[in-house]
Image (cartoon, rainbow, N blue to C red):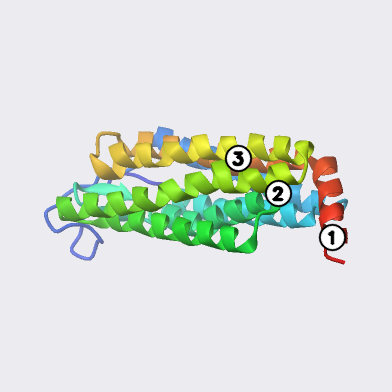
């Protein structure tokens, strides 16, 4: 699918590059596994929607989270959605398109589970979009100082997102009862831990370029599978609890 190749005049790469460090066979394997796992997960969630009532909103979120991620991995696996950045590294911008769509959906799903205020959910999503955009701009920056300025902006808005997940949404979940709080606690802390891994991988990949492109791809693929597919199955395992909570919430608004 993807191989190292000599640059031509029309290639999208820094003019000083004659070759590009591209993803190797191990990385291609990781892309393939992620594509298959996320694709199968999407199908499972679609099949599950039919038996859901109040839980449908959670399943719809999981469907689009895994569905968009599947398309992004198909693009990367097919040799699409990439360019070359400073340092003559292959850079998959398709990943950032994926994150710009799926991470807000993850926040929406967690906010719905917690029963958080719409304003809190919207604020978290807004900060998240800024974070993803900053990560992208930092990755494609040629000037080192500009790169790290964008990274600091991203971290600056990442902290409020973590606070919202750990405190704001948690308080809303506790107000809905111990069972919902328990479900939320599990999926929220999974998300928090895994989301902290993303900037660490970025730091040594798009940042310092210490990791190989293949290692970068493998690391991101693993975190994507855990934070999207596994998250979706954890939500699905709480089907009954979320159904009762959803019906109670619906009655409150009647």
- The residue at the point 34 percent across, 57 percent down is 134
Secondary structure state at the residue bearing disc 3: helix
The percent coordinates of residue 145 (x first, y second) are 16, 52
Separation of residues labelled 2 and 1 (CA atoms): 16 Å
186 on left or right of 95: right
The image shows residue 164, relative to residue 222, as above or below, that is below
Q: Nearer the viewer, residue 56 or 20?
A: 56
- The residue at the point 59 percent across, 51 percent down is 106
Q: Is residue 113 visible?
A: yes
Q: Name the residue that disc number 2 marks.
A: 113
Disc 2 crowd, CA 10 A, few/some/many (<14, 14-19, 20+)? many
Q: Name the residue that disc number 3 marks.
A: 188
Secondary structure state at the residue bearing disc 1: helix
The percent coordinates of residue 71 (x first, y second) are 55, 56
| Residue found at the far left of this picture | 16
Q: Name the residue that disc number 1 marks.
A: 252
Disc 1 crowd, CA 10 A, few/some/many (<14, 14-19, 20+)? few
Q: Nearer the viewer, residue 160 or 56?
A: 160
The percent coordinates of residue 95 (x first, y second) are 44, 52
């Amino acid at each position: 699918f993807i191989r190292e190749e000599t640059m031509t005049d029309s290639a999208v790469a820094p003019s000083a590059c004659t070759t590009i460090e591209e993803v190797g066979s191990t990385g291609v394997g990781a892309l393939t596994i992620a594509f298959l796992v996320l694709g199968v997960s999407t199908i499972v969630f679609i099949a599950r929607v039919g038996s859901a009532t109040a839980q449908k909103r959670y399943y719809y979120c999981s469907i689009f989270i895994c569905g968009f991620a599947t398309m992004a991995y198909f693009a990367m696996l097919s040799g699409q959605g990439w360019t070359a950045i400073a340092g003559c590294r292959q850079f998959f911008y398709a990943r950032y398109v994926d994150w710009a769509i799926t991470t807000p959906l993850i926040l929406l799903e967690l906010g719905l589970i917690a029963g958080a205020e719409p304003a809190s959910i919207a604020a978290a999503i807004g900060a998240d979009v800024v974070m993803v955009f900053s990560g992208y701009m930092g990755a494609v920056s040629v000037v080192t100082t500009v790169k790290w300025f964008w990274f600091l902006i991203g971290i600056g808005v990442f902290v409020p997102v973590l606070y919202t997940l750990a405190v704001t949404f948690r308080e809303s979940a506790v107000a809905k009862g111990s069972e919902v709080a328990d479900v939320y606690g599990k999926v929220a802390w999974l998300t928090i831990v895994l989301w902290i891994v993303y900037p660490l991988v970025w730091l040594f990949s798009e940042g310092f370029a210490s990791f190989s492109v293949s290692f970068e791809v493998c690391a991101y693929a693993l975190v994507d599978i855990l934070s999207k597919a596994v998250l979706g199955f954890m939500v699905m395992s709480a089907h009954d609890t979320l159904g009762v909570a959803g019906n109670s919430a619906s009655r409150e608004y009647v």
